[in-house]
Image: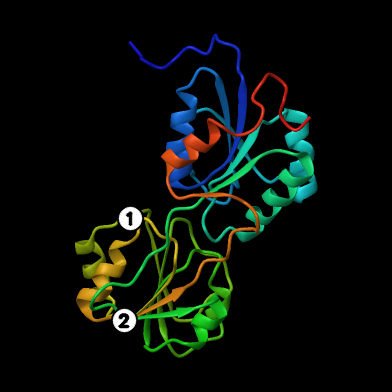
Amino acid sequence: MTNAPVKNAPVRRRVLLLGGTGEARRLAGLLDADPAVEVISSLAGRTAAPQAPPGRVRVGGFGGADGLAAWLRDERVDAVVDATHPFAARMSGNAAAACAAAGVPLLVLRRPGWSPGPGDDWRRVPSLAAAAAELPGERVFLTTGRTGLAAFAGDDRRRYLVRSVDPPEPPMPARTTVVLARGPFTVGDETALMREHRVDVLVTKDSGGAMTAAKLTAARLLGVPVVMVDRPPVPDGVPVAATVEDAAAWLAHAGPLMPGSGGA
């Protein structure tokens, strides 16, 4: 027997959740458990086998900010939560522009970034290009995603260990070893991997969260410096929630939530 609610009550709220993160899946689960809410999770479709969240799922782009604004009006969406990856700057910008045009409340759900602790050797940089220009080692553990390798492609001298969920896209450095894996990762596993490949510098984005933080602990234990790429800013004027619970509380008070009210 299932305890899942039967949605026979009138749906008072339709929420578009721009997803792809663990926080997005958790929030989708909370919203889908409410009979008065219809949650629509939108996935970019860049990952070959994404983890499907609860509720209705939409895969693929909207056609930019104008296409998203039109979709919000057509679907009569009441509120939007941007729970994309902290580095999905284009999608976040499109969401802000579309929601402003359609008159739909928007919240950004962003887990806090990482902070260095005692014993850490971090060098913060503003971009992948700056990271490529600031490498202090010769054996690089690159954990910046499969589409972020072009900035390092011209380096024929160093050896790169690249980890991603799906096979990375060229261009990439000539001397590259690829490991396909999905987190979470343990400190023991990360330490063993970095020792096996004799890693002497870690390059990563400031994604935050616990799922992939073990590599930072391993780097500290091994005395490996970290080149940390800062995340892009949230669009101006958009409220931010740091936790799923805060996002759910915001949604409980966001906008007029009567049938057919969204984006009208």
Give me the disc on residue 121: 2
The amino acid type found where label 1 is placed reads Ala
Q: How many marks?
A: 2
In the image, is residue 138 above or below residue 66? below
Q: Which residue is mark 1?
A: 210
The amino acid type found where label 2 is placed reads Asp
Give me the disc on residue 196: none
In the image, is residue 109 above or below residue 89? above
- The colour scheme of the drawn protein is rainbow
Residue 11, image x, y percentages: 60, 17
Looking at the rendered image, the quarter that the C terminus falls into is: top right
Mark-to-mark CA distance, 2 and 1: 19 Å
* Mark 1 residue element: loop
CB atoms at circles 2 and 1 under 8 Å apart? no
In the image, is residue 3 above or below residue 43? above
Looking at the rendered image, the quarter that the N terminus falls into is: top left
Residue closest to the eye, 187 or 147: 187
